[in-house]
């Protein structure tokens, strides 16, 4: 084999290996940076056929956004609107709700990612507002008045037009520790 040809191939292989290594390191660094941005405090629980995933985002100077994603476990189930009265419509349904207590205060209303639609329920004269079947994301702007342990109270009920309703969940507590520079979920 020609020595100059061998050196040229060897250099090309080394340069290619160096470029691939640099690209791999850059990709890892990019994923780490994205992961760091997305590392909002999160917790979840499943109760009465719905998984609820809570997270806190954009926490700066004692303010942030509390997000809850309500995901029915079974296909064809929906959640009731946040605007449903606390006792439902003619006793049917319970609103999707999130409230805070302790040093954490709401800075606005609970908003949902989906638009409610009205359904009729046998034996109920008034239409009932529900979200489309499947997951619903709600957000609540919050602020901390001081440091300490706060409680997030979650409420909801899920139903299916074919399979009926689950037992409503009311004031299910989730604990959160807040300071001016962070909010973290804590077991209690």
Image (spheres, rainbow, N blue to C red):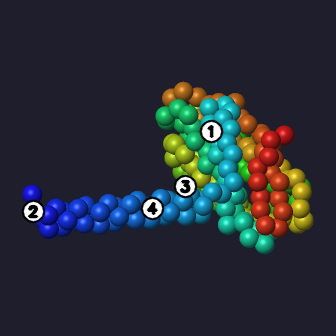
Q: Earlier in the sequence, mark 1 or mark 2?
A: 2
> In which quadrant will I find the C terminus?
top right
- Please state which of the two labelled residues, at mark 1 or mark 2, is closer to the viewer: 2
Residue 104, x across and y down, in percent: 84, 60
Residue 8, x across and y down, in percent: 18, 67
Residue shown at 58%/46% (left/top)?
A: 130
Q: Earlier in the sequence, mark 1 or mark 3?
A: 1
Q: CA distance from mark 1 to mark 3?
A: 17 Å
Residue shown at 60%/61% (left/top)?
A: 36
Q: Is residue 50 above or below residue 5?
A: above
Q: CA distance from mark 1 to mark 2?
A: 67 Å
Q: Is residue 153 visible?
A: no
Secondary structure beneath disc 1?
strand
Q: Is residue 184 found left or right of 122 in the rendered image?
A: right
Q: Is residue 47 found left or right of 115 in the rendered image?
A: right
Query: How many C-alpha atoms fall within 10 Å of the one at disc 2: few (<14), some, or many (≥20)?
Result: few
Residue underneath mark 1: 51
Q: CA distance from mark 1 to mark 4?
A: 37 Å
Query: How many C-alpha atoms fall within 10 Å of the one at disc 1: few (<14), some, or many (≥20)?
Result: some
- Please state which of the two labelled residues, at mark 3 or mark 2, is closer to the viewer: 2
Residue underneath mark 3: 114
């Amino acid at each position: 084999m020609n020595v100059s040809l061998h050196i040229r191939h060897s250099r090309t292989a080394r340069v290619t290996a160096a470029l691939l290594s640099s690209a791999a390191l850059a990709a890892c660094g990019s994923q780490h940076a994205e992961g760091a941005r997305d590392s909002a405090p999160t917790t979840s629980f499943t109760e009465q056929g719905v998984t609820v995933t809570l997270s806190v985002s954009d926490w700066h100077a004692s303010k942030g956004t509390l997000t809850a994603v309500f995901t029915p476990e079974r296909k064809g189930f929906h959640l009731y609107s946040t605007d449903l009265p606390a006792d439902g419509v003619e006793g049917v349904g319970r609103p999707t709700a999130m409230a805070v207590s302790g040093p954490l205060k709401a800075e606005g209303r609970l908003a949902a990612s989906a638009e409610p639609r009205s359904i009729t329920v046998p034996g109920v004269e008034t239409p009932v507002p529900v979200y489309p079947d499947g997951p619903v994301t709600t957000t609540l702007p919050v602020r901390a008045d001081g440091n300490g342990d706060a409680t997030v109270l979650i409420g909801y009920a899920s139903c299916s037009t074919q399979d009926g309703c689950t037992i409503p969940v009311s004031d299910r507590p989730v604990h959160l520790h807040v300071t001016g520079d962070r909010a973290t979920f804590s077991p209690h």
